[in-house]
Image (spheres, helix red, strand yellow):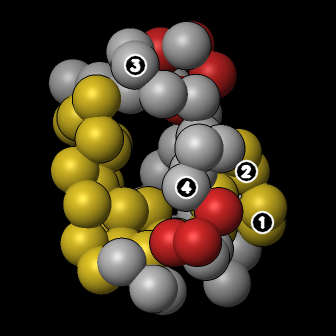
Amino acid sequence: MADLNSILTPGMIVRHPDRPEWGNGQVQSNIGGRITVNFREEGKVVLDGSKVALVLVSATD
């Protein structure tokens, strides 16, 4: 899973595959496999990229 998340960079729009109620989120940072995403309905969340494969929605805003 970490390989899929390694392409994520700040500004990309993603979804959490197990939390659709969070809505889309914007990647804030991706450092050492820890991905910070600001989700529309959940707020800022720090995720372990080795445990969840985020779904890319858009590479730009």
The quarter in which the N terminus is drawn is top right
Kindly identify the amino acid type of the residue bearing the numbered disc 1.
Ser
Comparing labels 4 and 1, the label whose residue is closer to the camera: 4
- Residue at 29%, 41% (x, y): give it: 47
Comparing labels 2 and 3, the label whose residue is closer to the camera: 3
Q: State how far apart marks 2 and 1 are (Cα).
A: 6 Å
Q: State how far apart marks 4 and 2 are (Cα).
A: 14 Å
Contact, CB < 8 Å: mark 1 with mark 3? no
Closer to the N terminus: mark 4 or mark 1? 4
**Rendered position, 4 above or below 58:** above
Q: Label 1, on which residue?
A: 58
Q: Horizontal and vertical percent for residue 8?
A: 54, 43
Mark 2, residues whose alpha carbon is within 10 Å: few (<14), some, or many (≥20)? some
Q: Horizontal and vertical percent for residue 22?
A: 51, 72
Q: State how far apart marks 2 and 3 are (Cα).
A: 16 Å
The quarter in which the C terminus is drawn is bottom right
Q: Label 3, on which residue?
A: 51
Closer to the N terminus: mark 1 or mark 3? 3
Comparing labels 4 and 2, the label whose residue is closer to the camera: 4
Which numbered circle lies on residue 33?
A: none
Q: Image quarter for residue 12?
A: bottom right
**Rendered position, 39 above or below 55:** below
Q: Label 2, on which residue?
A: 56
